[in-house]
Image: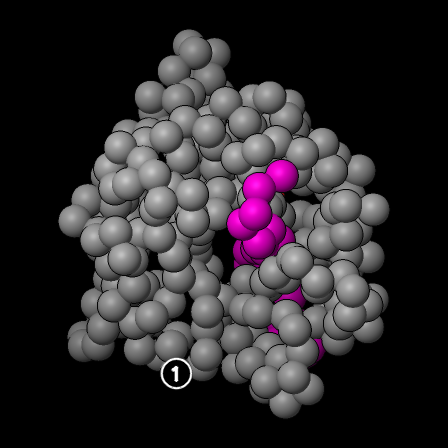
Amino acid sequence: MSSRTPIMAGNWKMNLNHLEAISHVQKLAFTLDDKDYEGTEVVVLPPFTDLRSVQSLVNGDKLKIGFGAQDISVHDSGAYTGEVSGPMLAKLNCSYVVVGHSERRQYHGEDEAVCNAKVKAAFRNEIVPILCVGEGLDVRKAGNQVAHTLAQVDGALEGVPAEQAERLVIAYEPVWAIGTGEVATPEDAQEVCGAIRGRLAELYHQDVADKVRIQYGGSVKGDNVNAIMSQPDVDGALVGGASLNADEFAKIVRFRD
Ligand code: PEP
């Protein structure tokens, strides 16, 4: 494992209303001990409607749990009905925002240009994007997972300066492993995460590449997280389904045990 601080982030997707969110974060905070946060960053990514409740709880009780949003508008304000802007998220103390999740790419047609604009909107508002990239099953079967994923990285980072890029979190999420129970092998994860770091060194500098945290996402659970985290270029996990269970997510946070 590297010297980068591992980041375990729970993407709740469209689950838990604001009352359930409070109870879930309370249970997580109760389950985790102080030592569990040592050397590991713990983040939850609730739906927009939960953010205010989570913020009040986290800030009021000074919890060590960070939080962020699942999407961001490319615009900072204006006539964009239904959108939520970077300044709004920043005002709520969101530290992170998910950009380019495969479900946004699939159901909302988000392409590299949109992801690029969202990465820039996040940084413009001092929010760190968790940029999701990864191949579908057809691409994996054709053996093109590295080229496909690196093209997504290139597109999303076009025009993003090094001083912003070095703060990025990138989540390598093979689409065929998301919510399917089909987890990539640690070697599969390392192959692409290592290639992403190599591409960051080409696009920027080795120093930038060394700072960026690269997560693996796709059916991560308490019993498979340790093997994945043992890979040199894997710095954390983006967790969907298992993050909805506080005990299971706590096991993931305690990946070293
Ligand atoms: C995700 O949605 O980012 C994800 C990785 O989901 P799951 O852990 O359920 O596969």
x and y, in percent, of residue 38 in the image: 70, 62
x and y, in percent, of residue 76 in the image: 23, 73
x and y, in percent, of residue 45 in the image: 55, 62
Kindly give the residue lying farthest to the top in the view shown.
142
The magenta stretch spans residue 14: yes
- Name above or below for residue 191 compared with residue 130: above
Q: Residue at x 24, y 37 (%)?
A: 203
The residue beneath circle 1 is: 91
Would you say residue 138 is visible in this rendering? no
Q: Residue at x 68, y 86 (%)?
A: 61
Drawn side of residue 13 relative to residue 115, left or right: right
The amino acid type, in three-letter code, at marker 1 is: Lys
Mark 1: C-beta under 8 Å from nearest atom of ligand 1 = no
The magenta stretch spans residue 210: no
* SS for callout 1: helix
Along the viewing direction, whichever of 176 and 217 lies nearer the viewer: 217
Q: What colour scheme has been applied to the protein in the rendered image?
A: one colour
For the N terminus, the quadrant is: top right
- Name above or below for residue 48 compared with residue 116: below
Along the viewing direction, whichever of 64 and 25 lies nearer the viewer: 64
Q: Residue at x 40, y 35 (%)?
A: 197
x and y, in percent, of residue 194 in the image: 46, 29
Drawn side of residue 156 relative to residue 19, left or right: left
Over which residues does the magenta segment extend? 1-23
How many labels, in total?
A: 1
